[in-house]
Amino acid sequence: MREKEITKLKDYKYGFTTDIENIRAPKGLNKEVIKFISKAKKEPKWMLDWRMKAYERFKNLKEPNWQKPKYPKIDYQDIYYYSAPKSTSENPKNLDELDPKLLETYKKLGIPLQEQQRLNGIAVDAVFDSVSVATTFKDKLNEVGVIFCPISEAIKKHPELVRKYLGSVIPLTDHYFATLNSAVFTDGSFVYIPPGVRCPMELSTYFRINASQTGQFERTLIIADKGSYVSYLEGCTAPMRDENQLHAANVELIALDDAEIKYSTVQNWYPGDEDGKGGIYNFVTKRGLCKGINSKISWTQVETGSAITWKYPSCILQGDNSIGEFYSIAITNNHQKADTGTKMIHLGKNTKSKIISKGISAGFSDMTYRGLVDISFKAKNSTNYTQCDSLLMGNKCGAHTIPYIKNKNPESNIAHEATTSKISEEQLYYCQQRGLNPEEAVGLIVNGFCKEVLQQLPMEFAVEAQKLVGISLEGSVG
Amino acid sequence: MEEQLKIDFEKLLENSNFSKKNVELKRKNFDNFIKKGFPNRREENWKFSDLNQIISKNIKNLSFYNDLSKPNKIDQSIFIDGLEHNKLVFVNGKIEKIEFDYEEKNKIEILDDLVLEKFNDVNNSLLFLNNAFVSNYFKLTVKKNYALQKPLIIYNITNKDLVSKNVNLKVDIMLEENSSLKLIEFSNDKSTTNFININYNFDLQKNSILKNYKIDNNSNSNIKYYFNNISQDTNSVSEIFLLSSGSEFIKNEINCNLNGIYASAFVNGVFMLNETKHHEIKTNINHLVENTKSYQLIKSVLDDTSKAVYQGKIFVDSKAQKTDGYQLSKAILLNDNTEFNAKPELEIYADDVKCSHGSSSGSLNEESIFYLMSRGLNYKEAKKLLINGFLLDVVEKITDSEIKNLIKNIMSLKQ
């Protein structure tokens, strides 16, 4: 691998170029690299200035270390911050070339054949070409005026929207990884729903053209204008292999008056092998701003992959009567580690938030729920309900709950509940008595445990996610 | 402050006759404190209560040396009436009276001139401060198979002479096998703006029972920090009740290690705060072996601009199967400017456990007030009755009926 990279670098010896086919920016993080990214993306000057500002800030920031899962030090100068999509010639020609283990998982998840091929970048038969499917979707979206495109395109075509909202929820001066992302982000989605429009379909990165490669530093910006509604899906249930170890994406949601955004994530990146070697670090910043009155943001996440997951999708409830919701399932197995939860910051009157978190740890893994509920003195009559349950399998794993609850308002109500338990022998016995093997029995019980959250997912996702829950726990019984 | 600390520390060494080894130990503790200073909000443990800021805001010219050579007068009127008890009286941090009239003399052992034996490297700068400045510490041992006939009350009194001083106190209590002790710790402060730093170490051996009630009810302007370290052996029981109400600032930190099977710990607490008071309870219950149990219940009623913090942590080791841990905190905020912060934390490494926590905060239920008012109570009475019932719930957990009644009287709660 290393040699391959070096030869690639050798091929590329004529300095910076706008010809982005098959090239990478040189290793490391410096002003030149940022300029290179900006140039490669043909960005206007204000964008470059913005990135530079973030970079200046980043230089003065320290890497946080309060989190529970510790990881070996990352050398930020040893990362490629830009690489163009790989040419198709390097991709496998057909499914037989793939890892049989991967194929087995696909089969269990029930993913159709052409989709399997697509996921691995295999050239798909013209009849099944999803690009054409995507085009029909595009027409439908254009009809109602929804803008859904890669963010680099939006920077060029809709600068007024991007300039107004980019960084308005996650500012340049935010924490370490968010600022790093602001400086070097390469791609991501941009969604704008015009006033009064109910987006006619679930939007998904999956249908976005040119999105075959997940970027290492993704940036997503979703704006729901007054009275609009959108449901957005991120990721997919199929295991994703990715050569980048660090993933530091930023996701910003903005809901104006009476608007609603539903954001669902299924994350199943490579978690490393059974001994905990390799795997992705998923350090994502997700934040939604309920800017207008009566607005609503709802996060749903199913986190089963990654060696380390470290993220807190949050809601800032600024508008009066706004609602924030967070539904989460996090499953860790083998040597995976997760430190996840949410922040609900109540600023407006009559704001409501609800947190349902289910954590399951097995093997040698470690699961932490960390959440903040902050009710400011202005947030009169606001309510919060939090429930976080953990399930442990075996005594080599850990499950932790660390909620921070701050209440400065006597007219508001906060309720928090948490439990930790294991699957009871009786339940297992009952299921096995009815002919299920122990693994199926555990899968069934865990699915019941997670039901509240799974119900929040869009239909197609929910079915696959249910199977995924079972698969993630394979090998943890007995 | 650092200057003052150095001057006062030298003064302490000059005026006391510590052994060479002891001076060394003290110096080591002192250096550690200088290095770390008073804790501030950057430390996770002090996130909600920045002691450094609180001290600099409330205490002008804090000094650290106390002259303990002169005896202090004891104001007899503050002794608790109507309850026969043994007494230990500390005035301004100096032991003034030891009275065990109701007990068999050979069943208890009292030492009041102990000095530090070894250096403990802990992640707590205030313990370093305590170890550096405490002159000698006090130890009470209850012998095997002996249960004290009457409760013991430790009076922690400060008088008017004490102003802007740091007082350090260290008390060790050892309960040998099958022994039991009811301990009430009663503070009475007439002093102003001092920083009082008290360290209790409890060692509970097999089958012993400790009932510990801490009462801080007299309004005063002192800043206090209590560190209670409890270590429990097989089958021992500790019951702690905290009434946190009087001082300007108190942080009660309880670190309880359940080292023996069937050991159990109960922590119940009440915050009754008004004005600008800011109190905190921080618990660390460590379940280290099988079949241990812990239970925590904290209730707070906050008025004016007061602030209460509850940080409770249950730790379950991977060996500690069949652990039963429970934690509940509830708060009623009576005023717009009050604040309640909670961090109920679970850290669990064993699978066959039953652990849960709950936390809620909000205002009094208007419907309940309406119900009471429709039955002829006025608004104020209705409110009072509801608060009464809310707090009574915790006080009822006290297992000793005599002391329960005493505490009800002190809190003026009605049945």
Image (cartoon, grey):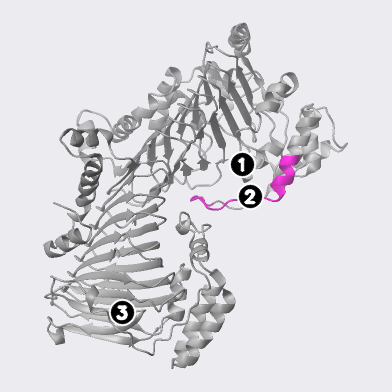
> Hey, what amino acid is under mark 2?
Ile
Please tell me whether mark 1 sits on a helix, a strand or a loop.
strand
Query: Who is closer to the viewer here, A434 or B412?
Result: B412
Chain for mark 1? A
Question: Which numbered dot is residue A74?
Answer: 2
Most prominent secondary structure in the magenta stretch? Answer: loop
Residue A180 in sight in this render: yes
Pointers 2 and 3 in contact (CB under 8 A)?
no
Pointers 2 and 1 in contact (CB under 8 A)?
yes
Chain for mark 2? A
Please provide percent x and percent y for residue A169. 60, 33
Reply above or below: B257 against A358: below
Q: Report the residue marked by disc 3.
A: B90
Q: Alpha-carbon distance for marks 2 and 1? A: 8 Å
Q: Alpha-carbon distance for marks 2 and 3? A: 55 Å
Picture residue at 32% right of the left edge, 51% below the top: B350
